[in-house]
Image (tube, rainbow, N blue to C red):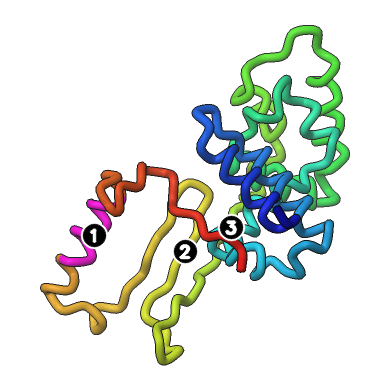
């Protein structure tokens, strides 16, 4: 097994676990990029069957500083959306000291609260008001390199924006029914939340 295949195998093994950990997946991607096995985020996306924004989100989670991770009793409980908000907060020099102080205080507690409470305490009054969320419209191109629609990756949702001129009534219905089949897990016998992975070439 090559290094590239090993990273993909580890990623898929975690993805298929009942207690799938976004943080573990994020650390696998970060390690794969740092090791030089993959030269860019684009290569990571192709190997792990992830969109550009999907790779970026996980890399942000994987780059959380140890002081923030240590605030949680178990890093496997850190949700992807939390990691992104915490990463952006940490990147702001104006709030980093406050965030660091809160994280250390939580880490020193003999008994820590649930993960969601820790996340809320870290970004409570004075930090979340800055609204760290930033959404990127990603163009999706067809065979002739023309933009067919845009994908907007948010913290909790994904929005596909398709110009009406590209959708006839029958095409619109086909798209809707295809999404229903995919999200119901009926497409290619693939369970919801577990996309088919591509092996690196």
**Are discs 2 and 1 less than 8 Å apart at CB?**
no
Of 103 and 175, the residue lying toward us: 175
Could you tell which of marks 2 and 3 lies nearer the N-terminus?
Answer: 3
- Residue 73 locus on image (x, y percent): 73, 20
Residue at 66% x, 30% y is: 76
- Residue 33 lies left or right of residue 22; in this view the side is right
Mark 1 falls on what kind of element? Answer: helix
Mark nearer the viewer, 2 or 3: 3
Could you tell which of marks 2 and 1 lies nearer the N-terminus?
Answer: 2
Residue at which label 2 appears: 152
Q: Residue furthest left?
A: 170
Q: Residues within 10 Å of mark 3 (few under 14, many from 20)?
A: many
- Which region is colored magenta? 174-182
Mark nearer the viewer, 3 or 1: 3
Residue 48 tag number: 3
Q: Residue furthest bottom?
A: 144
Residue at which label 1 appears: 178
Per the model, the C-alpha gap separating discs 3 and 1 is 23 Å
Mark 3 falls on what kind of element? Answer: helix
Which quadrant does the C terminus fall into? bottom right
Mark nearer the viewer, 2 or 1: 1
Q: Is residue 96 visible?
A: yes
- Residue 61 locus on image (x, y percent): 69, 46
- Residue 44 lies left or right of residue 137; in this view the side is right
Could you tell which of marks 3 and 1 lies nearer the N-terminus?
Answer: 3
Residue at 70% x, 42% y is: 86
């Amino acid at each position: 097994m090559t290094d590239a295949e090993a990273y993909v195998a580890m990623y898929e093994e975690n993805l298929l676990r009942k207690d799938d950990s976004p943080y573990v997946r994020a650390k696998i991607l970060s390690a794969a990029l740092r090791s030089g096995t993959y030269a860019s985020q684009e290569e990571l996306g192709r190997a792990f069957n992830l969109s550009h924004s999907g790779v970026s989100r996980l890399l942000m989670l994987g780059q959380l500083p140890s002081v923030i991770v240590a605030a949680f009793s178990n890093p496997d409980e850190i949700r992807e959306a939390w990691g992104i908000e915490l990463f952006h907060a940490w990147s702001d020099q104006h709030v980093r000291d406050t965030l660091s102080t809160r994280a250390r205080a939580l880490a020193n507690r003999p008994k820590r609260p649930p993960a969601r409470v820790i996340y809320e305490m870290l970004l409570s009054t004075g930090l979340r008001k800055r609204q760290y969320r930033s959404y990127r419209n990603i163009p999706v191109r067809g065979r002739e390199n023309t933009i067919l629609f845009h994908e907007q990756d948010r913290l909790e949702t994904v929005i596909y924006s398709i110009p009406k001129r590209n959708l006839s009534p029958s095409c619109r219905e086909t798209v809707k029914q295809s999404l229903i089949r995919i999200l119901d897990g009926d497409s290619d016998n693939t369970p919801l939340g577990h996309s088919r992975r591509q092996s690196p070439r």
